[in-house]
Amino acid sequence: MQKLYRKVMAGVTFLIEHLATILFILFFIVVILQIFFRFVLNMPLTWSEEASRYLNLWSVLLGAALAVKYKDHLRVDLIDDLVKRWPYRAQVGFYMFTTVISSLVALSFLTGSIKMTIDRWHIPLTMVPISQGVLYLALFTSSLLMLGYFAHHLVRYIIDFRRNEGGDVK
């Protein structure tokens, strides 16, 4: 069962990494096209600004979920250095607490994004022929992924707390 879980987690992470990368590359291409058409050809594209904004939004939110997975999200080094001086179980307890708080924030994003996705699904964007709900779907997807990764971290912390091995928390 653990092997299957690891394979699924690795597969989901692989998919997110590549999708975020592709969306960022598309964002970059659209911005270059926008600059080229506006300043070289003097014929600005009507859809490029809106498309680049939403491609960036999706890539950033998927990247935020990956930051949670790899524990690369925003942290304060001063606090981390202070916490590393604590006993092992206190470190684990602190990181469990911060993970729960972060999960609650992600849960609030999830509930808000569900409401906004449903509310805006039938409203089209101005220039790009997709629904506004697709934008809020990015926040929904990111929040759901974050919650999954936070749950994974929380289980690891609980296991570490029970083992009480010492050292720095991973």
Image (spheres, rainbow, N blue to C red):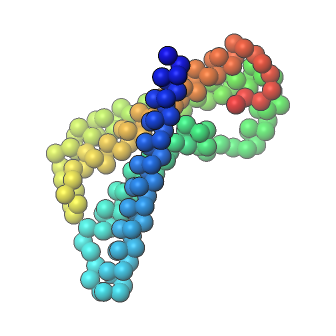
Seen from the viewer's position, the closer of residues 165 and 46 is 165
Q: Is residue 44 above or below residue 72?
A: below
On-image quarter of the C terminus: top right
Residue 105 visible somewhere in the drawing: no
Total marks drawn?
A: 0
Residue 136 falls left or right of residue 154: left
Seen from the viewer's position, the closer of residues 20 and 142 is 20
Residue 21 falls left or right of residue 159: left
Q: Residue furthest right?
A: 85
Q: Residue at x 41, y 55 (%)?
A: 22
Q: Is residue 59 above or below residue 27?
A: above
Tell me which corner region of the image, top left, top right, bottom left or bottom right, holds residue 139: top left
Residue 10: x %, y % from top left: 50, 34
Residue 14 falls left or right of residue 122: right
Seen from the viewer's position, the closer of residues 84 and 169 is 169
Residue 75: x %, y % from top left: 65, 43
Residue 5: x %, y % from top left: 49, 23
Residue 45 falls left or right of residue 112: left
Q: Residue at x 38, y 39 (%)?
A: 141
Tell me which corner region of the image, top left, top right, bottom left or bottom right, holds residue 155: top right
Q: Residue at x 26, y 67 (%)?
A: 47
Residue 72 visible somewhere in the drawing: yes
Q: Residue furthest top?
A: 162
Q: Residue at x 61, y 43 (%)?
A: 72
